[in-house]
Amino acid sequence: MEMKRIITYENKMVAICMLCFGFAMFDRFAIANLSPFMMEELNMTNTDLGLVMSVFALAWAISGYVGSLLSDITANKKLLLGLLTLLSSVCAFSTGLAINFIMLLGIRFMMGVLYGPTFPLSQAFAMAQSTPSRRGLNMGLISTTSMGIIANLIAPILLVALCLQFGWRITFFLTFIPGVIVAYLIFKVLKEPDMAKGGDEATSNKASFRESLVIFKNTNVLTSMVFSGLIMTWNVGILTFAPLYLVVVKGFDPSVMSFVLAAFGVGAVVWGIVVPSLSDRFGRKRATIIFSLLSVISPLGLLIFSSPVAIGLCAFVGWSGSGVFALYQAAIIGESVDKKYVSTAIASVQMAGEIVGCVIGVAIAGKLADSFGLQAPMIFAAVCIIMATLVAFAYYETAPAVLAKRNAFAE
């Protein structure tokens, strides 16, 4: 009986979406984790590494919006998510075939195109198929906890260990396997989400491009677009340059570096559950402001301390901002717009964050690293997360439990 309560469709849906997005981010940041082994062979500079990440992000941003809009218009999210997961794993495999920087750039661009819609499509399932009282938690598990476990915790340790044993090319070849498994689970288990407002079958699931433009009149959507650019610069800037920084500046052995980076993963796992859960009870806006500000600890810890333990502790505590991702990217947006446009709204925020934070921001961070040293991206990240905290004050509250309390008090 207890097992039946655990193995519900909702829990299976969340688990599969976690695997889907988690391995998408695993593949995305694999190149950063393996950069100390690749850059010399491919004759790459820090600027080149930033450009590779930026090109991926640009493709991810544009395809995320286009793919999500297509899924809203056709009301066929399951097929699109499964196909893109399968095809993107082929691109991850192809990274190991790169013989020069230009070829690597092209492969990662195509990979970004295929992976772009993964996040908004996964969150659309959670938005439509979650119990309202645990919606924030489910979205946090998919967006942050999955990334923490798979991309931040497992990835650096596993990828570095495989690379030391087999080389970076074979390591990329092996990343094909999880994608095939996840695609199979999507087709086998997931059900097409009903995005009609309020679950009313008389209301069409399908959206139109012209109608979808109404999302850009929403204050929370616009706030999240600005907020996203700043927090993504903090997040991706650290994840891109921390591996090199720890090896080159701090002088850590690659294996030690991988375990220090795993602290970010532990933080993402914990905060990915804690932050959305607290936001369900105490409010999305309050949680976003508090935990964004706390995130400045992660880049400052990298700059100030030289002990792996101290840096790891700061990485854990200061990665609380990763728990905010489920709020500004999904929960707040999903509770602010018509469910019919959720995928498009989430993808719009993703696009803004990717272009501003992961294309422009990471490119700037790479240039700063070449001009002023690898400390510069960490300072840049600290400034951006402080600015993001200030922007978060523009949100209006959307958490159902908090709004219910306010209404009851008003009566």
Image (cartoon, grey):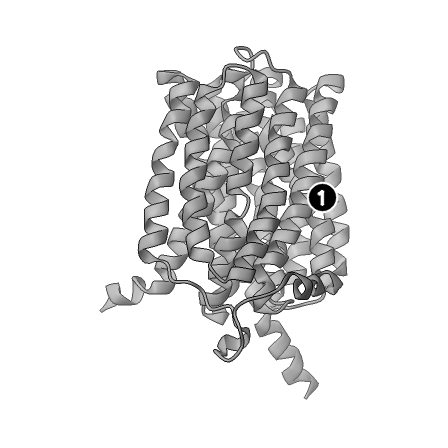
Classify 25 as above or below 244: below
Task: Measuring from the top left, give residue 123's x and y in whole percent.
Answer: 51, 57
Residue 5, x across and y down, in percent = 29, 67
Picture residue at 41% right of the left edge, 28% below the top: 93
Residue in view at x 75 percent, y 38 percent: 383
Q: Secondary structure at mark 1?
A: helix
Residue at the outermost left position:
1
Relative to 15, residue 310 above or below: above
**Which image quarter holds the N terminus?**
bottom left
Q: Which residue position holds label 1? A: 230
Q: Residues within 10 Å of mark 1 (few under 14, many from 20)?
A: many
Residue 180 in view in this figure: yes
| Image mark count | 1
Quadrant in which residue 46 is drawn: top right
Q: Residue at x 60, y 55 (%)?
A: 346
In this view, the residue in front, 267 or 25, is 25
One can see residue 273 in this view: no
Q: Quadrant of residue 385?
A: top right
Q: Look at 54% across and 22% down and name the residue there.
A: 104
Looking at the rendered structure, the kind of residue marked 1 is Leu
Q: Is residue 273 above or below residue 157?
A: below
Residue 280, position as x, y percentages in the image: 55, 66
